Amino acid sequence: MASNIGSTATITGNPQNMMIGSFSQIPYAEFAATLAPVALAGLVLTVVLIGLLYRRTLSNGTAPETMPTTIQIDRVMGWKAVVASVLLLGLLFAGLPPAKAAIIIGALLLLTRRIESQRVYAEIDWSLLLMFAGLFIIVAGAEHTLLNRDFATAVTAIHLDRIPVLSGLTAVISNLVSNVPAVLLLKPLVVSLPDQRSAWLTVAMASTLAGNFTLIGSIANLIVVQGAAANGIKVGFWDYFRVGAPLTLLTLAAGTLWLSI
């Protein structure tokens, strides 16, 4: 939940924000200045809500016993990563397009003889990439089939230029087809609105926060659940929904109110 909410703050926080940054051409610093407060408020709400709903478990629980482990740290690669991260942030806030900044820093990080390229490629989640490719194909078909003149007329009738309406529609679509395809579906509608800047920021906020509604609402949720299961911790659908649903409604309300001011 925190990873979803925290990723709202910047263009590079998640895939859909990066797409929106490319479509809207909103500067990195301006994007962060607008949505970082939403992310901060959302993180506070997350802590408060989980603390209230699981106060007995948190107060009576005992820390699990862990075996001492020895962690080997490659200090050279560690410092290289820190310097690269600082440079990347500097380039982003200086106004360089995120894609270009990422390519430059990524190329510099790959210039090493300390780690073989096979080890880097082995960390790529190919099944996840395949799933995204399938989603893009489905969304492209839906776009050509559904986004006709009658659909555009119906959308105009619901006043999509109003932030609460656009926020609610984005949240619903994001939970139906996932947030990245939702952004692709909404793109033809957003570009037809008079205030595209506010519309894109609303879509970025709502599509990201909506991922907390259910366990399958975002890729981050699935990755965390799989990791937890590998360590013997089971997170059920309804256990997650108990916190995720009210948290999503609260954060969407807070974000919508902030963007409407």
Image (spheres, grey):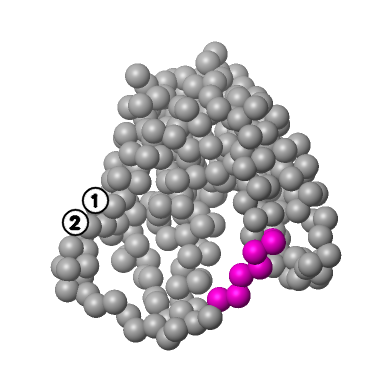
From the viewer's perspective, tell me whether residue 211 is left or right of residue 200.
left
Residue 183 visible in this rendered orientation of the protein: no
**C-alpha gap between disc 2 and disc 1:** 6 Å
Which residue: 47% across, 23% down?
160
From the viewer's perspective, tell me whether residue 203 is left or right of residue 92.
left
Q: Residues within 10 Å of mark 2 (few under 14, many from 20)?
A: few
The kind of residue tagged 2 is Leu
Of 18 and 138, which appears nearest the observer? Answer: 18
The kind of residue tagged 1 is Val
Which residue: 60% across, 25% down?
27
Q: Is residue 118 above or below residue 26?
A: below
Which residue: 65% across, 27% down?
94
Q: Which mark is residue 52?
A: 2
Count all numbered tags in the image, as a single digit: 2
Counting from the top left corner in percent of width and height, residue 26 is at 60, 24
The stretch drawn in magenta includes residue 26: no
Q: Which mark is residue 48?
A: 1
The stretch drawn in magenta includes residue 74: yes
Q: Which residues are magenta?
A: 71-77
Q: Residues within 10 Å of mark 1 (few under 14, many from 20)?
A: few
Label 1 element class: helix
Residue 79 visible in this rendered orientation of the protein: yes
From the viewer's perspective, tell me whether residue 101 is left or right of residue 116.
left
Which residue: 53% across, 37% down?
10
